[in-house]
Image (cartoon, grey):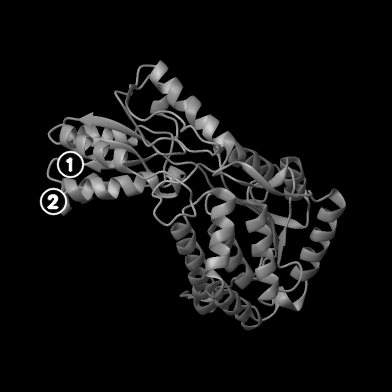
Amino acid sequence: MAYQTVNPANNQLIKEYPPHTDADIEAALQKADALYHSDWSKGEIDQRLPVLHKLADLIDSRVEELAKIASQEMGKLIEQSRGEVKLCAQIARYYADKAKQFLAPVPYKTEFGDAWVEHHPIGVIMAVEPWNFPYYQLMRVLAPNLAAGNPVLAKHASIVPHCAETFAHLVREAGAPEGAWTNLFISSDQVANIIADPRVQGAALTGSEKAGSAVAAQAAKHIKKSTLELGGNDVFVVLDDADLEKAVKIGVQARLTNAGQVCTAAKRFILHEKIADQFLSQFTEAFRKVKVGDQMDASTELGPLSSKDALETLTRQVEEAVKNGATLHVGGKPLESKGNFFEPTILTHITRDNPAYFEEFFGPVAQMYVVKDDDEAVKLANDSHYGLGGAVFSQNIERAKRMA
């Protein structure tokens, strides 16, 4: 597995990072395990929280620098990267301010004496994280675990090594001791070996179902805790009494944010038959007006997909969907470019026997479905292999709540 920084706007190789060896992993495990058995992890939380405060301040002072690294490496629009960086500072500060309260003992009433629940660190954690939010995905693992005293070994996605390395340097600069957060450029087999190691007590993954299944199986085999956040195929339901102008505007944003590469993005648009034609017409017009271009240009509305592999996968999915009966309403192919750009695309008439019906499309592809009433909308929305989320647009809030 090559760890490389490649600009997805032109597929130019910027830097290649050498992988960590098994000896490097053993050294990292020793440091993390030693830290877990030290006063840093076992002692008072007050000594750990200042690191999160300092980390938040460091991130706030380097928003532009960090945003440029992320956008150049995985293609996110520069303004969206700025937002992600600022969110990371907020997360660090939130746990710095709240973790002591979260981890305080919880008393329980009993007639048999005193009873309470205490919270203690459990040990070294192995985290496997994705590229689509290259800082946020790391911060949401680091902040609570650092506060709790759990050292973390982190394997980031192979296409964002610069973000991974930069984040690790920030954590150390903020005052975290060696072993609190260790970045590793490693393979899936090496991850499995780390999870199996008796010094590791848990695993966390955000990523594909395939990767999640492998991590869950390995954690279960060795009776260890695991948390997984996998794919999504969220619905965007528009009822016949919805404000269509607002629904279209938000729907376009919900599908195209981060070039459509978000697990909780709107992907399946379920339209009441009374407004379906009008919504589709307005949505199509908005898609056709989207400015596709370099992610560093502030005027760009849709940047490149994260990698050449991502572009090829999405292209193949759209072609297979059409081959199996879907109608290509607009878009449907990569743009002629050195980069990984894909046209804003709308698919209609997707039947249940079409593989696209159950697939997650990680890119700027919207699927449109038409239903006759609320019951049919609910049935269609729930006919999915995925969970995560959804949205309902109606001016009748009680009706929308019932559907949700």
For the N terminus, the image quarter is top right
Residue at left offset 48%, top offset 57%: 78
Q: Is residue 159 left or right of residue 259?
A: right
Which quarter of the picture shows residue 347?
A: top left
Mark identifier at residue 239: 1
As measured in the structure, the alpha-carbon distance from the residue carrying label 2 to the one carrying label 1 is 9 Å
Residue 135 showing in the rendered view: no
Q: Is residue 183 left or right of residue 331?
A: right
Residue 332 showing in the rendered view: yes
Residue that mark 2 sits on: 396
Q: Are marks 2 and 1 in contact (CB under 8 Å)?
A: yes
Residue at left offset 54%, top offset 30%: 312
Q: Amino acid at mark 1?
A: Leu
x, y (%) of residue 177? Answer: 74, 74
x, y (%) of residue 331? Answer: 36, 30
Task: Tell me if mark 2 has few (under 14), some (14-19) or many (20+) residues whose alpha carbon lies within 10 angstroms of its own.
Answer: few
